[in-house]
């Protein structure tokens, strides 16, 4: 017997036959399946210094993709045929942090090894997930350049609290995964970092662009500059978007919010510009805490960041 | 290639190997599959008199099932092998109410016709969905007795607003689906109904039990009494649980909340007692509005109502 | 020209022709108009010790009356013809407290002098408004007995903060408006008062009933007892309902919430019982802070308190 | 007897004798009364694709007018003598959509027929209300030009869901009420529309300006341009402000929020500029959902949109 | 120079000279200082299976003590001279769980070794903190009896997730700290545990009382019974109050809320009764998550639990 | 005995040894202690026209300082050695406004008389606190110039409501404390003031800059201009930051929010520029209501305003 209306295994959302929502192009990865963009969730934020619900973000960001369509009016291009493969979320261990970090690195590596896609999006989690993720990219692709949008350097020492969400780039540099000169930080904000870490950045030749730089030079100019710095010397470029680079008015759901940051338009324009470069193979989006957000505004912004990156 | 940790098509929730969550026993219906309890969503609340998000409840109630386990300590009985078949949600039409009512009645009827299960749970939606649901049960099973937990009679006239969420039992009686004497209402609250409709209830021999009755006689006594009234004359018994029978402190997410209602314990005890009767074939749970709720408390209560009904 | 649907001066709320909502029986007082119940707003809470939005409650309680009907099913009596006269809200002065207290006392007195109604309901504001209100009743009606539902004695000294919301009954006693023996306090809660004030209550022969009394003797018994204490010696009885007598689960919007208080049913039953006595001429409802509430639950409870008092 | 302070029929809000709040200039329409601006509420959003409380907006926007004064410091002009006539809200039918659409068109038409005012403001409701409203304007004033601020084309097909809030301009065009070339859309956002509808817009010569256009050309330039396109060929110009044209940070209460939209200043400047044109006779403001908003921020913005339109 | 009003090192809270708030009796421990009750914070909830902000509770519970006074009207006894010594919060390590558990056990032990107080209150944190806390008590006092108010057995296996908040009593039993027969569990709720763990409880002779037991026998009877079971064989009695024993209406801020639990009055009465026993030396209060709570209702209840325990 | 981990008198916040949080540089004033910046709380908002919780802001702003560090990356300067002296909060009287105003003026005066610091920050409270604060500065330093960031003139008449939060600058001018020509107002917004008060501003030669001025001339230009106007004729310059100068998207916690105001970046840039002038001796920050805010966003912005002012 067949049903007239019921479809027990499918949800009952309204469907406009001419509209493809982005989440409709997202299907679970299966062996030997290929696609355009690989998506993986890294739902881990237990090592955040402050209580963080960023572990919930892979779910809310995927859900936010259901609010937007695959069609870019600006480019008059419909990306409905671009296939997004969902590799699922890495299962975290409730109490063993080392185990979870290992699982994340292994899983990103395995995903890359499938060679199923051209580009990959990692959904954090807190910024700590960039350590295993970038490590896996390095193993796969070689010398790696990183563009990091962030209010903070994330170069804290490890002694005081182990590998927290404040340490990923310090760890990457010290373990030789990433060279300081291959790291570009955009949106560094006043009164949000310690002198020691700014000095560390200088000493390691990290390229940092503060909010005053953004106000004076413009985000487009800076983005262009960082791309030029990386494109010749690196084998691949990795984007790391800490959503707290954005002003609290536009990204109210980040754990460490504050005023004076990027506008949503500035971030979107900058990510879109960077993503057009052919060396860009991966992007992570981190520090979205849906439990603190208002109407998933920050996850919605994250979804737009994804679209700007994927649909180039 | 296989993954060590990733399972692209499955969620990454923590799993205790000895615990079965209720939602793990819920699987989509497939042709010729049988089970114990059929579950269907009737996500419709557009005809509510006040703005209602009860259409979201089938999702939140199913999700709440994931917070509880199949084991009843009170009975020392594990219902992990009781199979719940999910028939999905009836797709509503965005603008055509008549069409949606038809789809709901047809779909409940089709579900019953599969004869796949012993008992069925309908998740509203507002109370308006009881009209198509009970109509379908009547067609399938014959003379139907209804136990309704509710602060309101739901016997409004049709002239003033058409078939709203205040009218289902009036409509059922006037269209001959249900006889007044086969309807028992528990929890009717002071200052929540019009005299005309109380008079209508009397005229049609509806059995009504007010909150003063509950306070004086006890909910167990009343439940026992209504079962006795129905068991000999009806072919089947249908439970209709309007969550606003419950006091606003225990069910803060109903559209029409107020003080002086049932406690959660009173409702759960009453539903459990009624559900043990072999004639009970169906139950609907309505008027849970997750958009107004606090921490899905009302959906959690609804999930417990389901468990008390299913696990008898 | 006349309009088919528009009624520029009336709101467009759905109307069931057979249902009378309580707010539909509430009309502005006009000279020489008479009615059954007088209603006045005392929207003042600036002298509360903690920040209080109780000044907003007259509006939300009146609005809550629009959710309930005039028909009591328990008594099978429709009070649709009982007229509620609204005397409006006393305009408070933004910065001059003494002026505001004077305005409140004068206005309640003027309302009583109209002799337009049998009974009056004063909507606070914080508990400080009971001082001018009860003073006005005393002037009009003579020796006054007060039944106060409250977690607190409200007998604080005046030296430390002037006439705050913790002092009304102290002030009434010390200014000779109310005799200690004519005051009955129900619901006094543990760890919510100072010994000095409990001693003061004893010394002045105030009748106090704690929550332990309520648990052991029952609220009905206690209510009956206080009525007996007052009915022979007083010229009139005034009810003062501080909503924080109720447990925080049932009245989450009071400024000073806490666990272990009355249930909503206990308060409603007690007020209903007391209100039947013919000497009861006035009731105030205080300490409802809509800015802290959840879905106006506490205002809804206040509306039910009003209905239990008015419809006897 | 007269009262010293009480005014039973007036609210008790603080009054600064030199300040006129906008809502004080709003009075109910009465027969033969004339004024400057007519205001009507179209509280309908039941046909929205997603659950929408936009039906509550006419009330919250009117209330927001009470927070602002009639004096424009920028122009040094006090509009305290400009009379706003309130025609009330069209009463919606709880279950009959066709009936409600008819009532809205009839009521707007009747309002226009009074010829009481120079300009009219329609308060939605969802964008579906623009269909009956613009139809009524067309009947009264002839060829109509429309400037629409919107993230979306609102040109969906009717087959999939009937006349939803995604279809008004499609319906207007297909029923010959509005010509494509007379429609200008400002603020169209990436990934928020389907290719089919962008193509439809092109085919019908609709003038569309995307967010990239706004960023590159500036909102003032674009506004000037659309005015020029319409002023010579149309008999009247109608403004349709879908608040979701605005970025979610500035209009958090729209049903379909997202990042990358107009700032509040851009919208206000654009509406003010357009409204100065003498052909502008009407404006609707739609898609404000107060039940999802934060502190009525979106209704406050809507109130400012009104003031920019009225006080030119 | 001295100030007339300013006291730079003290807060500016209003002070009634006759009222002592509970938090005014709480002072930091200093060497050789003695008191009546020792208070320590165990702000750890990182190993909770679901995201938990219970680590914030020591702060909110201490703050809630500031809302209540030291005077018990029920006993007519003022505890203003009972000294509460605050040992502060154990500093957790951001990423090293084992280290944090060690710190907690050491710190509780060190506190007990001061022998500064008669009784100690441990403020969690999630239920995982009971493991180090009870271990420390065992070391100090010998054979330990535990009364646990809880919806859950907390006897999960360790294999699936390590030492989470679901495992403390399993670990205590398996490491020989606590004997099954010395553990009494009150409030175990239906559908909230797995059969395996109920069986484990039986096998280890744990005394369990379900909610059905509470409804049928009464909480006073049960409390009396468990005291009798423990008083003769144990050297000390430890109370472990998992606030989720309480119904979600009364304790809305627990991570794992649900309906059908204890009322606030039942819990308070039971804790008060147990605490009178001279063997009771310690109590922990766990699973209060202030980040999910409404108006700190659950922390307020926790404060009352403390007062019922301390003031006996 | 000493503890391994516990520090009973210190909180247990995570500490990165290289980072100094701003609140770590804030210590209570003690006699003869000197520092760089004096901080005082003026927690008074009872005379606000609308209900205001601005009295809570001194606490939340101080707390927000704990989220930011003393290091300015823009200047590459660490202000960890700049000492902030906390003079505490002025204790308000619960019911006597005149007394509270006197206490505030006396306390600010006493603080200035200590001559302990170079610059002082006053944390309101509503804008009414600027009256006693500026009066005290005038007494100490002589002719005072004021730069006021504000949407409103705050020049209301006193007759209608006494000295409310709308009157401080009127009172200062009329009592001869401040000359009109020494007052500069930036950010005055349309439809937010009465003509009478704009006229009053003109008549008294107050320099006002509207939002249109800001849009056209730029905030930097205007700031430069007002500094030039004041530096030659005044003995000292006082900054008064009413946070409602900022758009509601960036400062959602002000009592009187609205669209079309300054961005956070504009305010921060302007305050930073003005604060560099050596005549600037004091700044107040007012009209932050934490009870209405979202995630303390407005207090966080206030903390940044402080840092821009202090660290010059």
Image (cartoon, coloured by chain):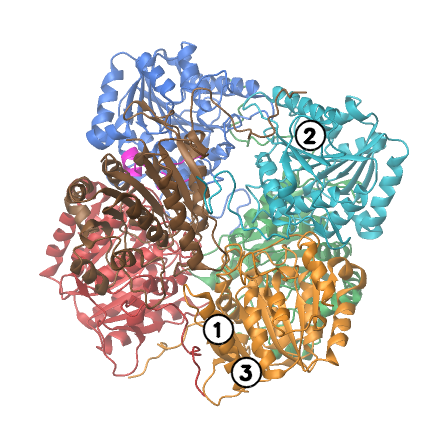
Chain colours: A green, B blue, C brown, D cyan, E red, F orange
Mark seen at residue F102: 1
Q: Is residue D112 visible?
A: yes
Task: Name the residue that disc number 3 marks.
Answer: F112
Q: Position of residue C239 (x, y in %)?
A: 28, 44
| Mark 1 chain | F
User: Could you tell me which residue is drawn at 51 percent across and 18 percent down?
Assistant: B162
Q: What number of labels is visible?
A: 3
Q: Position of residue A61 (x, y in %)?
A: 59, 48
Q: Quadrant of the C terminus of chain F?
A: bottom right
Instruction: Confirm whether circles 1 and 2 share one chain.
Output: no
Give the x, y percent position of residue B169: 40, 18
**Is C310 on the left-hand or right-hand side of F212?**
left
The quadrant holding residue F148 is bottom right
Q: Find out whether the residues at labels 1 and 2 contact each other: C-beta distance under 8 Å.
A: no
Chain for mark 2? D
**Corner quadrant of residue D312:** top right
As drawn, F197 above or below F281:
above
Disc 1 and disc 2: Cα gap in Å? 53 Å
* Residue at the spot of label 2: D33
Outermost residue to the front: D1
List x then y, in percent, for residue C309: 30, 36
Look at the picture and state if A71 lies above or below A214.
above
Identify the residue at the far bottom of this view: F32
Q: Magenta stretch: dominant SS?
A: loop
Q: Which quadrant of the figure contains the N terminus of chain F?
A: bottom left
Is A121 in the magenta? Answer: no
Q: Quadrant of residue C109?
A: top left
| Relative vertical location of residue C178 with respect to residue D62 in this rendering, above or below | below
Which segment did they paint magenta?
A: B248-268
Marks 3/2: CA distance? 62 Å
């Amino acid at each position: 017997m067949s049903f007239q209306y019921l479809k027990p295994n499918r949800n009952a959302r309204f469907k406009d036959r001419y509209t493809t929502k982005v989440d409709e192009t997202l299907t679970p990865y299966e062996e030997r399946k290929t696609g355009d963009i690989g998506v993986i969730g890294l739902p881990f934020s237990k090592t955040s210094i402050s209580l963080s619900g960023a572990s919930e973000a892979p779910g809310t960001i995927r859900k936010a993709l259901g609010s937007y369509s695959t069609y870019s009016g600006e480019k008059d291009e419909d990306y409905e045929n671009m296939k997004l493969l969902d590799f699922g979320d890495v299962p975290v261990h409730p109490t063993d942090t080392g185990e979870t970090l290992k699982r994340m690195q292994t899983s990103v590596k395995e995903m890359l090894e499938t060679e199923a896609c051209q580009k990959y999006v990692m959904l954090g989690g807190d910024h700590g997930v960039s350590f295993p993720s970038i490590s896996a990219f390095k193993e796969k692709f070689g010398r790696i350049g990183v563009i990091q949008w962030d209010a903070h350097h994330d170069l804290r020492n490890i002694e005081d609290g182990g590998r927290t969400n404040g340490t990923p780039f310090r760890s990457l540099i010290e373990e030789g995964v990433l060279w300081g000169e291959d790291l570009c930080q955009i949106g560094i904000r006043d009164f949000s970092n310690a002198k020691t870490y700014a000095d560390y950045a200088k000493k390691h030749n990290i390229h940092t662009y503060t909010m005053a730089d953004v106000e004076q030079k413009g985000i487009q100019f800076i983005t262009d500059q960082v791309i030029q710095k990386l494109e010749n010397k690196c084998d691949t470029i990795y984007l790391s978007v800490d959503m707290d680079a954005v002003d609290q008015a536009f990204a109210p759901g980040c754990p460490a919010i504050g005023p004076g940051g990027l506008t949503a338009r500035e971030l979107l324009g900058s990510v879109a510009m960077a993503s057009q470069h052919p060396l860009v193979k991966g992007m992570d989006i981190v520090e979205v805490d849906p439990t603190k957000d208002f109407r998933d505004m920050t996850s919605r912004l994250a979804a737009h960041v994804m679209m700007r990156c994927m649909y180039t």
